[in-house]
Image (cartoon, rainbow, N blue to C red):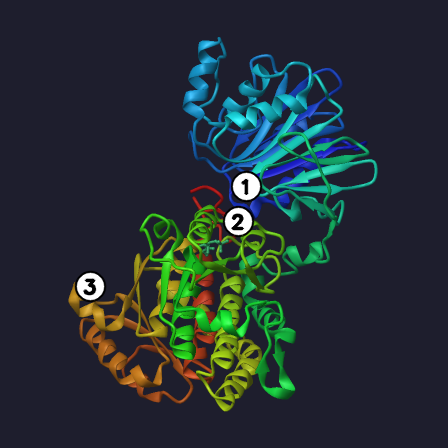
Amino acid sequence: MCGIVGYIGNREAQSILISGLSKLEYRGYDSAGISVYNGKALQTAKKKGRLAVLEEQLQSNPLNGHIGIGHTRWATHGKPSDENAHPHSDNDHQFSIIHNGIIENYLSLKEELVAKGHVFKSETDTEVIAHLIQSLYEGDMEQAVQRAVKKMKGAYALVVLSKSEPDKLIAVRLASPLIVGVGQGENFIGSDIPAILEYTRNVYILNDGEMAVLTRNDVQLKDVEGNSISREIYHVDWDIVTAEKDGYDHFMLKEIHEQPKGYRDTMGSRIQSDQHKVDLKELTLSKQQIESIDRIHIVACGTAYHAGLVGKQVLESMTRIPVEVDVASEYRYRNPIITNNTLVIIVSQSGETADTLAALREAKSQGATILAITNVVGSSVTREADQVLITWAGPEIAVASTKAYTTQLITFYLLGCHFAEVLETKDEQFIAEVVSALQVLPEQVEMILSQAEDIKRYAEHIAQHDHVFFLGRGLDFAVAQEASLKLKEISYIHSEAYAAGELKHGTLALIEEGTPVVAIATQEDLFDKTVSNIQEVVARGADVLGLSTVGDEELVKSVNQLLFIPKTLPFLTPALSIIPLQLLSYYAAMARGTDVDKPRNLAKSVTVE
Ligand code: F6R
């Protein structure tokens, strides 16, 4: 979603802003712009389309100056256009601002400002903020911003530049991420760490309701009343190279190949190999607290929700505690039954998804204990949850989530083992078996990745079709849903995931000669049933790619092509079976020539409701 960069120092701001924005391209955007103060006035350049379009314009008309702000916009209010792109300004070009989030009361604010003579150029909610700050300015920019945010309702990460006080940048946040990078004789603002990592590893992470005042040599953190806040600097210890492509054609392919490492890092010291046990040291839930949990809600969006579907089956089978899984945007409005004994597991790669955060807050306000499974240390979700389990997937750049999903699965397995041990719902031997099977998963993933060429061939075949079906039962159905989302989002091929036994209740009507069907059949206890369902589509002419575990040769007779994953415990198969299906989507998208890492209309971090 939208990206923010700000710079104040002695270097030319333009190149730092553009380079920072390029590091945020993965978030998804449809226009880009920068404002730089040139010693006399604020100059702004903004263009619809990719950053390259803006860069082309800047080549012939550079903006010179040592302080500036930059933004990539993902349209919410108003279509993607030059006018609607950020930065926005007031009628006197006194302030230039960039904003992530949504101002919910922008229409009433706009009406008041129009009545006072303000003239608007764009359809955005953001332009209202620029006019509002100007109307409240009485010689002190900090106070004007404080007054403005008190009038604004909604979510914002906001950065303000003014020609009246051109020696400072002001940043303020509510429910939209913002960080400050601390340099020497220069300081930075970013909506995400990669934006500034080339220049500094020392950052302050702003919390809701906090503002930062940046000058060349100083950063002051305050609340919106102006009271000083002290905060420790967070030192970023991962490298920019891990956030770059490293020789792969796309971030997505790189991230698919990073999964063995993600599995190993996520298990890491949480597995005590010598004792074949799981030790989740970071969880501070006592035995008594775990015993008091009488229901679990897993809440997430998109791919993280699909990880939750697997998590449900894992936790229920390991603990016998009833688990419900909800899409976050539905959960908060369905009046869920929450008590003090409810554990709500929030799953989010970014830890910043607006719907997920809102669900977290709703559950917390009703007394639930919140356990977050997230990939971003210091994200909003980690700060608001009671308990946090980090998935050590490393930065995920491609919009389509791969390694975040699989490390979420690993985390659910670890959590299941931990709870089962505390609750004594599974014996030591069973847990030891799971732990041993978990430990060989990374090598098994490597084996699957080495079969990429076979998968590519089938992907090129399905890329010629407009509709694909994914079938499975039990855990295979959960994987089918994730595989189907992956294919849709990056190849734009329409696909549906169906519980294999449900097909005959309507969807079978859509199967005709040559319809591609991917049938996942890895669950021993459901195998025969799934094979019967496969026969039903084969009989209607479907072209079936089967996916099964080594040894399930029975399927060979029923399908056109067959892929195998190595043998593992039945409930661990999702951590293997999704791998060839991620590659399938990737190669289908390649065959169709789509923008794999930045699919149309999508954003990496969805910070609006
Ligand atoms: C799909 C995808 C999205 C995200 C969803 C939640 O590949 O990436 O469906 O899973 O937007 O995002 P997080 O996990 O950051 O809360």
Residue 352, which numbered label? Answer: 2
Circle 3 SS class = helix
Up/down of 529 relative to 518, above or below: below
**Where does label 1 land, which residue?**
176
Q: Amino acid at mark 2?
A: Glu
Mark nearer the N terminus (2 vs 3): 2
Q: Amino acid at mark 3?
A: Thr
The residue located at (53%, 41%) in the rendering is 175
Spatial separation of the CA atoms under disc 2 and disc 3 = 36 Å
Mark nearer the N terminus (1 vs 3): 1
Disc 2 residue: CB within 8 Å of ligand 1: yes
Mark nearer the N terminus (2 vs 1): 1
Point out the residue furthest to the top here. 117
Residue 507, which numbered label? Answer: 3
Q: Are marks 2 and 1 in contact (CB under 8 Å)?
A: yes
Circle 1 SS class = loop
